[in-house]
Image: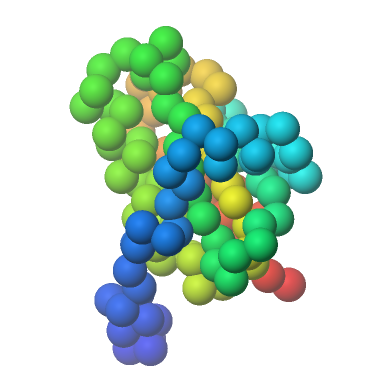
Amino acid sequence: MSNTVSASANARFTKEQRLLTPAAFREVFDATERKLHQSHLMAFVRTNTHEQPRVGMAITKRKVPTAVSRNLIKRQIREQFRVKASILENKDIVFIVKNSVKGISKIELKNEINNIFKKLEKK
């Protein structure tokens, strides 16, 4: 058990692991290889040419009206990505909210994010 704790403690979320430019997001949306659905979230996945996975988030005001809620979703996605990045292949992943998350608990949100990452893990 101590090995998993130390691995998580050493995991970092670096700038190289983020999709930053509109062009990078457009590449993922235009050439999506997989779409992973959950009840509130959806992920677009595409293989990248980098040696590591990258994540981006397109969380809109229309689906999540309050900044507090949008930031909570982003923090949860970043944290789960940070922990799982070492076991993911070199993929670009963009998360979007497809249904309003009003009334969803933090645990349910975390489970949906984890379910998406489980589908992406290396085999």
Picture mark count: 0
Residue name at image x 55 percent, y 61 percent: 53
Name the image quarter holding the C terminus.
Answer: bottom right
Viewed as shown, does residue 30 lie left or right of 96?
A: right
Point out residue 87 in the picture as x, y percentages from the top left corner.
Answer: 56, 72
Which percent across, then down, holds residue 24?
56, 42
Question: Is residue 120 at all visible to an observer of this figure?
Answer: no
Seen at 47% across and 30% down, the residue is: 58
Q: Residue at x 31, y 79 (%)?
A: 10
In which quadrant of the rendered image does the N terminus lie?
Answer: bottom left
User: Given the current orientation, which residue lies at the most extreme left position?
Assistant: 68
Q: Residue furthest top?
A: 62
Q: Residue at x 69, y 49 (%)?
A: 46
Q: Is residue 46 left or right of residue 85?
A: right
Where residue 41 appears, as percent x and y from the top left, is 54, 32
Q: Is residue 35 visible?
A: yes
- Residue 93's x, y, as percent? 58, 47
Work out whether residue 67 or residue 14 is closer to the camera in this orientation and state it. Answer: 14
Judging from the image, the colouring scheme is: rainbow
